[in-house]
Image: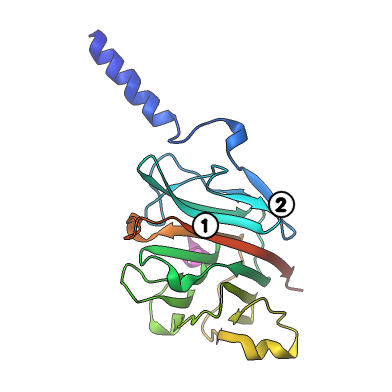
Amino acid sequence: MRKSLLLTMLLFTSLIMPLEAVDESTVTKEMVFGGQTWRVKASVGPIAPGPNYWSNSTRSVWMDDQGIHLTVLKRQDIWYSTEIFTRNPLGYGTYLFTVDSDFMNYDPNVVAGFFTWDTQPVEANRELDIEFASWGIEGNMKGQYVVQPFSSPDRLKLFDPNMQGTYSTHRIIWQSDKLQFTSWHGIVDPLQEHAADNLMADWVFDGEIPSEGRARFRINLWLFQGRPPAGDTNHHLVIKSFSFVPWQ
Protein backbone atom coordinates (compact mmCIF):
# COMPACT_ATOMS: atom_id res chain seq x y z
CA MET A 1 0.00 0.00 0.00
CA ARG A 2 2.79 2.41 0.96
CA LYS A 3 4.64 1.58 -2.26
CA SER A 4 1.49 2.21 -4.29
CA LEU A 5 0.93 5.53 -2.51
CA LEU A 6 4.52 6.57 -3.14
CA LEU A 7 4.24 5.80 -6.85
CA THR A 8 1.01 7.78 -7.03
CA MET A 9 2.65 10.78 -5.35
CA LEU A 10 5.64 10.61 -7.70
CA LEU A 11 3.35 10.46 -10.73
CA PHE A 12 1.32 13.42 -9.49
CA THR A 13 4.49 15.44 -8.85
CA SER A 14 5.80 14.70 -12.34
CA LEU A 15 2.55 16.01 -13.82
CA ILE A 16 2.49 19.29 -11.93
CA MET A 17 6.21 20.13 -11.97
CA PRO A 18 7.70 21.70 -15.10
CA LEU A 19 10.49 19.96 -16.93
CA GLU A 20 12.86 22.85 -16.22
CA ALA A 21 13.82 24.69 -13.05
CA VAL A 22 11.07 26.82 -11.54
CA ASP A 23 13.43 29.48 -10.19
CA GLU A 24 11.70 32.71 -11.27
CA SER A 25 15.06 34.34 -12.00
CA THR A 26 15.80 31.77 -14.72
CA VAL A 27 12.69 32.24 -16.84
CA THR A 28 11.55 34.97 -19.19
CA LYS A 29 7.86 35.79 -18.83
CA GLU A 30 7.55 39.10 -20.69
CA MET A 31 9.74 41.44 -22.72
CA VAL A 32 9.10 44.94 -24.07
CA PHE A 33 10.42 45.25 -27.60
CA GLY A 34 9.49 47.18 -30.73
CA GLY A 35 6.66 49.02 -29.02
CA GLN A 36 4.98 45.79 -27.85
CA THR A 37 4.97 43.63 -24.76
CA TRP A 38 5.81 40.05 -25.68
CA ARG A 39 4.97 36.94 -23.71
CA VAL A 40 6.94 33.70 -23.87
CA LYS A 41 5.36 30.32 -24.52
CA ALA A 42 6.16 27.47 -22.12
CA SER A 43 4.84 23.93 -21.74
CA VAL A 44 5.25 20.96 -19.42
CA GLY A 45 4.83 18.46 -22.25
CA PRO A 46 4.82 18.42 -26.06
CA ILE A 47 2.17 20.67 -27.62
CA ALA A 48 1.52 22.18 -31.06
CA PRO A 49 3.05 23.03 -33.35
CA GLY A 50 5.16 19.96 -33.80
CA PRO A 51 4.33 18.89 -31.15
CA ASN A 52 7.30 20.31 -29.23
CA TYR A 53 8.46 21.07 -25.72
CA TRP A 54 8.43 24.88 -25.30
CA SER A 55 10.88 26.67 -23.02
CA ASN A 56 10.87 30.11 -21.40
CA SER A 57 14.25 29.53 -19.75
CA THR A 58 16.66 32.46 -20.08
CA ARG A 59 19.04 29.96 -21.69
CA SER A 60 16.49 29.43 -24.47
CA VAL A 61 14.95 32.89 -25.02
CA TRP A 62 16.28 36.27 -23.98
CA MET A 63 16.61 39.93 -25.00
CA ASP A 64 19.78 42.03 -25.20
CA ASP A 65 21.08 44.94 -27.28
CA GLN A 66 21.03 42.71 -30.37
CA GLY A 67 17.30 41.99 -30.10
CA ILE A 68 15.19 39.02 -29.00
CA HIS A 69 16.90 35.65 -29.27
CA LEU A 70 14.97 32.44 -29.96
CA THR A 71 16.55 28.98 -29.99
CA VAL A 72 16.04 25.31 -30.61
CA LEU A 73 18.16 23.92 -27.80
CA LYS A 74 18.90 20.50 -26.35
CA ARG A 75 19.14 20.10 -22.59
CA GLN A 76 19.10 16.89 -20.58
CA ASP A 77 18.33 14.88 -23.73
CA ILE A 78 15.19 16.95 -24.46
CA TRP A 79 14.86 19.37 -27.39
CA TYR A 80 13.15 22.66 -26.53
CA SER A 81 11.63 25.07 -29.03
CA THR A 82 10.76 28.73 -28.38
CA GLU A 83 7.93 31.13 -29.23
CA ILE A 84 6.96 34.68 -28.31
CA PHE A 85 3.67 36.48 -28.90
CA THR A 86 2.30 39.96 -28.36
CA ARG A 87 0.35 40.42 -25.16
CA ASN A 88 -2.26 42.54 -26.93
CA PRO A 89 -4.19 41.72 -30.12
CA LEU A 90 -2.93 43.78 -33.07
CA GLY A 91 -5.11 42.85 -36.05
CA TYR A 92 -5.17 45.07 -39.14
CA GLY A 93 -2.03 47.06 -39.81
CA THR A 94 1.54 46.89 -41.11
CA TYR A 95 3.95 44.45 -39.49
CA LEU A 96 7.62 45.10 -40.23
CA PHE A 97 10.51 43.15 -38.73
CA THR A 98 14.17 42.38 -39.34
CA VAL A 99 15.74 39.01 -38.61
CA ASP A 100 19.32 37.76 -38.22
CA SER A 101 19.37 34.06 -39.12
CA ASP A 102 20.78 32.01 -41.97
CA PHE A 103 17.71 30.06 -43.06
CA MET A 104 19.67 28.27 -45.79
CA ASN A 105 21.80 26.48 -43.20
CA TYR A 106 18.90 25.26 -41.07
CA ASP A 107 18.60 21.58 -40.29
CA PRO A 108 15.79 20.05 -42.41
CA ASN A 109 13.62 19.67 -39.30
CA VAL A 110 13.91 23.29 -38.08
CA VAL A 111 11.12 25.79 -38.85
CA ALA A 112 11.12 29.58 -38.39
CA GLY A 113 7.64 31.12 -38.29
CA PHE A 114 6.31 34.68 -38.21
CA PHE A 115 2.54 34.81 -38.11
CA THR A 116 -0.75 36.16 -36.84
CA TRP A 117 -2.95 33.94 -34.69
CA ASP A 118 -6.32 34.32 -33.00
CA THR A 119 -7.19 31.84 -30.25
CA GLN A 120 -10.74 31.73 -31.65
CA PRO A 121 -10.90 29.01 -34.33
CA VAL A 122 -13.06 30.97 -36.77
CA GLU A 123 -11.45 31.81 -40.13
CA ALA A 124 -8.68 29.27 -39.42
CA ASN A 125 -7.57 31.32 -36.38
CA ARG A 126 -6.92 34.25 -38.76
CA GLU A 127 -3.49 32.77 -39.39
CA LEU A 128 -1.23 34.58 -41.86
CA ASP A 129 2.25 33.00 -42.15
CA ILE A 130 5.75 33.81 -43.25
CA GLU A 131 7.74 30.60 -42.79
CA PHE A 132 11.18 29.24 -43.65
CA ALA A 133 11.58 25.46 -43.55
CA SER A 134 12.56 22.29 -45.38
CA TRP A 135 9.75 20.31 -43.71
CA GLY A 136 12.04 17.38 -43.01
CA ILE A 137 13.42 17.06 -46.54
CA GLU A 138 17.15 17.60 -47.04
CA GLY A 139 17.93 20.39 -49.52
CA ASN A 140 14.31 21.59 -49.64
CA MET A 141 14.62 24.96 -47.88
CA LYS A 142 11.83 27.27 -49.01
CA GLY A 143 10.23 30.44 -47.86
CA GLN A 144 6.47 30.54 -47.96
CA TYR A 145 3.60 32.95 -47.48
CA VAL A 146 0.36 31.31 -46.41
CA VAL A 147 -3.21 32.47 -45.81
CA GLN A 148 -4.83 29.74 -43.75
CA PRO A 149 -6.60 27.49 -44.28
CA PHE A 150 -4.27 26.11 -46.92
CA SER A 151 -7.12 24.52 -48.83
CA SER A 152 -5.98 25.38 -52.37
CA PRO A 153 -2.70 26.38 -54.08
CA ASP A 154 -3.81 29.99 -54.49
CA ARG A 155 -3.54 30.43 -50.70
CA LEU A 156 0.23 29.80 -50.67
CA LYS A 157 3.29 31.25 -52.37
CA LEU A 158 6.62 29.40 -52.25
CA PHE A 159 9.95 31.10 -52.94
CA ASP A 160 13.69 30.45 -52.72
CA PRO A 161 15.26 32.61 -49.99
CA ASN A 162 18.71 32.64 -51.69
CA MET A 163 20.05 34.38 -48.60
CA GLN A 164 22.64 37.12 -49.11
CA GLY A 165 24.16 37.05 -45.64
CA THR A 166 22.10 36.46 -42.50
CA TYR A 167 19.96 39.61 -42.33
CA SER A 168 16.49 39.83 -43.87
CA THR A 169 13.52 42.20 -43.58
CA HIS A 170 9.87 41.15 -43.80
CA ARG A 171 6.53 42.92 -43.97
CA ILE A 172 2.86 41.98 -43.81
CA ILE A 173 0.28 44.60 -44.76
CA TRP A 174 -3.09 43.37 -43.51
CA GLN A 175 -6.18 45.46 -44.16
CA SER A 176 -9.81 44.66 -44.84
CA ASP A 177 -9.19 45.32 -48.55
CA LYS A 178 -5.50 44.42 -48.92
CA LEU A 179 -3.17 41.61 -47.88
CA GLN A 180 0.44 41.73 -49.02
CA PHE A 181 3.59 39.84 -47.97
CA THR A 182 7.09 41.09 -48.83
CA SER A 183 10.63 40.00 -47.92
CA TRP A 184 13.97 41.69 -48.62
CA HIS A 185 17.61 40.75 -48.29
CA GLY A 186 19.44 42.72 -45.60
CA ILE A 187 18.18 45.49 -43.35
CA VAL A 188 15.84 47.50 -45.57
CA ASP A 189 13.58 50.52 -45.25
CA PRO A 190 10.69 49.65 -47.60
CA LEU A 191 10.02 53.34 -48.22
CA GLN A 192 13.44 53.90 -49.77
CA GLU A 193 13.89 53.58 -53.53
CA HIS A 194 16.74 51.05 -53.24
CA ALA A 195 14.47 48.59 -51.41
CA ALA A 196 13.43 47.05 -54.74
CA ASP A 197 17.07 46.15 -55.44
CA ASN A 198 17.07 43.86 -52.40
CA LEU A 199 13.73 42.18 -52.99
CA MET A 200 13.56 38.50 -51.98
CA ALA A 201 9.85 37.84 -52.61
CA ASP A 202 6.49 39.61 -52.82
CA TRP A 203 2.90 38.41 -52.95
CA VAL A 204 -0.46 40.13 -53.00
CA PHE A 205 -3.23 37.76 -51.94
CA ASP A 206 -6.36 38.25 -54.06
CA GLY A 207 -8.71 35.90 -52.22
CA GLU A 208 -11.07 36.53 -49.30
CA ILE A 209 -9.13 38.37 -46.58
CA PRO A 210 -9.68 37.23 -42.98
CA SER A 211 -11.24 39.71 -40.55
CA GLU A 212 -8.87 40.97 -37.85
CA GLY A 213 -10.68 39.52 -34.82
CA ARG A 214 -8.29 39.47 -31.88
CA ALA A 215 -5.22 38.18 -33.69
CA ARG A 216 -1.86 38.54 -31.99
CA PHE A 217 1.53 38.35 -33.69
CA ARG A 218 3.79 35.39 -32.96
CA ILE A 219 7.34 34.37 -33.80
CA ASN A 220 8.68 30.88 -33.23
CA LEU A 221 11.57 28.53 -33.89
CA TRP A 222 10.55 24.88 -33.69
CA LEU A 223 10.97 21.30 -34.87
CA PHE A 224 8.82 19.81 -37.63
CA GLN A 225 6.78 16.94 -36.16
CA GLY A 226 8.92 17.27 -33.04
CA ARG A 227 11.82 15.51 -34.79
CA PRO A 228 15.27 16.38 -33.41
CA PRO A 229 17.74 18.05 -35.78
CA ALA A 230 19.38 15.42 -37.92
CA GLY A 231 22.75 16.94 -37.12
CA ASP A 232 21.99 17.16 -33.39
CA THR A 233 22.82 20.89 -33.50
CA ASN A 234 21.28 23.82 -31.64
CA HIS A 235 19.71 26.64 -33.72
CA HIS A 236 19.43 30.37 -33.12
CA LEU A 237 17.40 33.27 -34.50
CA VAL A 238 17.53 36.97 -33.55
CA ILE A 239 14.66 39.41 -34.10
CA LYS A 240 16.62 42.63 -34.63
CA SER A 241 13.66 44.98 -34.88
CA PHE A 242 9.87 44.99 -34.94
CA SER A 243 7.26 47.64 -35.61
CA PHE A 244 3.50 47.66 -35.99
CA VAL A 245 1.42 50.49 -37.43
CA PRO A 246 -2.35 50.03 -36.99
CA TRP A 247 -4.50 50.44 -40.08
CA GLN A 248 -6.44 53.66 -40.03
Indicate which disc, 1 or 2, sits on the residue closer to the N terminus: 2
Mark 1, mark 2: which one is toward the viewer? 2
Image location of residue 188, percent across then percent down: 69, 79
- Amino acid beneath label 2: Val
Question: How many numbered marks, from 0 up?
Answer: 2
Please name the residue that numbered disc 2 is placed on.
32
For residue 120, the mark is 1
Q: Residues within 10 Å of mark 2 (few under 14, many from 20)?
A: few
Question: Which quarter of the rendered picture does the N terminus lie within?
Answer: top left
Secondary element at tag 2: strand
Q: Left or right: 13 with respect to 22?
A: left
**Location of residue 141 by image quarter:** bottom left
**Residue at left offset 46%, top offset 43%:** 43
Q: Which mark is residue 7?
A: none
SS for callout 1: loop
Q: Position of residue 14 (x, y in %)?
A: 37, 28
Nearer to us in this view, 126 or 171: 171
Quick check: is 121 in the magenta stretch? yes
The image position of residue 21, as x and y in percent, is 50, 32
Residue depicted at 73% across the width and 69% down the height: 246
From the viewer's perspective, tell me whether residue 36 is left or right of residue 208.
right
Magenta residues span 119-125
| 173 drawn magenta | no
Question: Residue type at mark 1?
Answer: Gln
Say which of 52 and 200 sits in front. Answer: 200
Look at the image and tell me in which quarter the C terminus lies.
Answer: bottom right
Task: Evaluate whether residue 180 shows in this view.
Answer: no
Compared to 125, does 29 lie above or below? above
The front one of 104 and 111 is 104
The reply to whether callout 1 and callout 2 are in contact (CB within 8 Å) is no
